Image (cartoon, grey):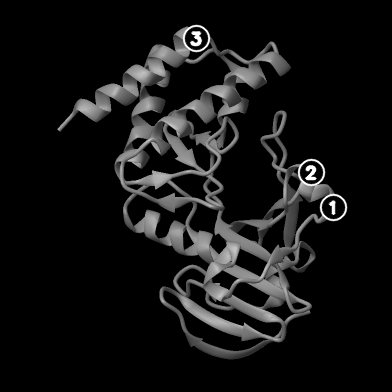
Amino acid sequence: MDQVSEGRSGLIGSVENTETGAILYDREVIDHICGMSFRPDSWQRAEPVTGFLRSAGRGNTMFVSDGREEFVLRHYRRGGLPGRVNPDLYVWLGEERTRAFREWRLLKRLVEMGLRVPRPAAARYRRVATFFYTADLLTVREPGIRALSDRLVDSPATEDFWRGTGEGIYRFHKAGVCHADLNAYNVQVDAADRIFLLDFDRGRLLPPGAWQQRNLARLYRSLSKIRKLEPRVAFSDTNWRQLIQGYSSAARSP
């Protein structure tokens, strides 16, 4: 268990040293932090995130609550073949290059830009031996949102929905937001079908470029894949054209 040992000023937010690393947090969101805050069993209520297909992630994400506020607690895990050998260790390259601190700072900036992303509460890294670390992120839970994949199982989406989704993605691209894995799980929608993006691990702010089309291509592949996996997913090439029309229309607007 990590105990806070010393406070210091961060670039954005407050940073507390611990026995094995440090915690970065926003005092306006969470006024007290310690290593126990990153253990699900230390919260009054904790439950795993569930969802259709892969929308719950890799089993590393929990909804937690102190009885008043609700948060999303995520432990960083590696995917693919590397994750089978080394599930959660990352190479140490310095505090500001840890996955958790970088994502926390990016989310903080995106919130300030008025974009629909999770508000960051706290981020932690823990040093493991000399060359590695593990990481965790705590964000404020956004009520009523669900993965795009889940939304498409429930009922077919209208043309307005797809055009609105394209417009929403363009707003992120216009702000220079490059999502490293724009897929049907990280694109979320609320009850009014407005989009909300999750999981900015490895995300960046970039000038306009080819990455924008690569983002869209990644989302198309994801939607096509889940359509093959689950016949109930209501997605067609016509829907994709509607999304692109919404994106292009927003790009032409002043």
- Of tags 2 and 3, the one toward the viewer is 2
* Residue contact at pointers 2 and 3, CB within 8 angstroms: no
Task: Tell me which amino acid carries mark 1.
Answer: Val
The CA span between labels 2 and 3 is: 31 Å
> Residue 20, position in %: x, y?
72, 82
* Residue contact at pointers 2 and 1, CB within 8 angstroms: yes
> Residue 71, position in %: x, y?
60, 57
**Between 131 and 197, which is closer to the camera in this rendering?**
131
Task: Say whether residue 114 is left or right of residue 48.
Answer: left
Quarter holding the C terminus is top left
> Residue 22, position in %: x, y?
62, 79
**Between 206 and 36, which is closer to the camera in this rendering?**
206
Label 2 sits on residue: 81
Q: Residues within 10 Å of mark 3 (few under 14, many from 20)?
A: few
Q: Quadrant of residue 233?
A: top right
Label 2 residue SS: helix
Q: In this figure, what is the number of numbered marks?
A: 3
Q: Residues within 10 Å of mark 2 (few under 14, many from 20)?
A: few
The CA span between labels 3 and 1 is: 38 Å
Q: Residues within 10 Å of mark 1 (few under 14, many from 20)?
A: few
From this viewpoint, is residue 68 visible? no
At a point 50% along the width and 88% down the height, the residue shown is 8
Task: Tell me which amino acid carries mark 3.
Answer: Asp
Quarter holding the N terminus is bottom right
The CA span between labels 2 and 1 is: 7 Å
At a point 67% along the width and 56% down the height, the residue shown is 74
Label 1 sits on residue: 85
Label 3 sits on residue: 237
